[in-house]
């Protein structure tokens, strides 16, 4: 079941999607999908990025693969920030639960003086990032 969680007008997160969800994502107005979940992390039943990429491109969406496990590294944050800046908006990022994606989004905006706004936007989407407030 597709669970899109709007964070801002230009960004949303979702738990794991599959290729069957892509048309609904396009119909909801999203222009880019960012994949943050590595293939195989969830075993053989996890939908693969290749199939999701194929469906996304067939639907006219941009697909960006930035898979990572654990906390995002500076390189991941740089790539994530570049994708947000360059890819058509609105953007949907997904991982297993959405937490990795929302964390990468929040940390991409760190140091911009909007920590409370970032934590509040994440909370509105159902994610508690209050532990990151000092970094934001």
Image (tube, grey):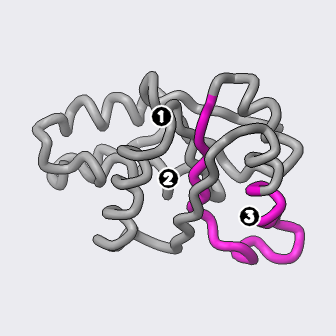
Give me the disc on residue 101: 2
Circle 3 is placed at which residue position? 49
Position of 16 relative to 71 (above/below): above
Q: Which quadrant holds residue 113?
A: top left
Determine crowd level at label 3: few under 14, some 14-19, many 20+ residues with C-alpha closer than 10 A. many
Does the magenta portion include 7? no
> Where does residue 119 sit, x and y in percent of width and height?
30, 37
Total of numbered circles in the picture? 3
Give me the disc on residue 35: none
Q: Marks 2 and 3, how far apart in space?
A: 15 Å
Quadrant of image for the N terminus: top right
Lower position in the chain sequence, tag 2 or tag 3: 3
Does the magenta portion include 47? yes
**Which SS class for mark 3?**
helix
Determine crowd level at label 2: few under 14, some 14-19, many 20+ residues with C-alpha closer than 10 A. many
Contact flag, marks 2 and 3 (Cβ < 8 Å): no
Residue drawn at x 41%, y 32% is 123
Considering the whole magenta stretch, tell me its main secondary structure: loop
Lower position in the chain sequence, tag 3 or tag 1: 1
> Where does residue 104 sit, x and y in percent of width and height?
39, 55
Circle 1 is placed at which residue position? 11
Q: Which quadrant holds residue 48?
A: bottom right
Q: Which dot, 1 or 2, sits closer to the camera?
A: 1
> Where does residue 22 sit, x and y in percent of width and height?
79, 40
Q: Which residues are magenta?
A: 30-53
Residue drawn at x 25%, y 29% is 117
Lower position in the chain sequence, tag 1 or tag 2: 1
Q: Marks 3 and 1, how far apart in space?
A: 20 Å
| Between 7 and 125, the one nearer to me in the picture | 7
């Amino acid at each position: 079941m597709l669970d899109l969680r709007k964070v801002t007008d230009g960004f949303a997160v979702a738990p794991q999607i599959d290729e069957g969800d892509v048309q609904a994502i396009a119909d909801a107005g999203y222009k880019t999908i960012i994949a943050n979940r590595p293939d195989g992390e969830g075993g053989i039943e996890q939908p693969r990025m290749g199939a999701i990429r194929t469906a996304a491109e067939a639907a006219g969406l941009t697909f960006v693969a930035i898979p990572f496990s654990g906390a995002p590294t500076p390189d991941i944050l740089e790539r994530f920030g570049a994708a947000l800046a360059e890819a058509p908006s609105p953007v949907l990022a997904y991982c297993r639960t959405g937490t990795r994606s929302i964390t990468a989004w929040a940390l991409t905006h760190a140091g911009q003086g909007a920590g409370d706004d970032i934590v509040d936007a994440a909370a509105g989407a159902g994610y508690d990032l209050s532990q990151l407030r000092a970094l934001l």
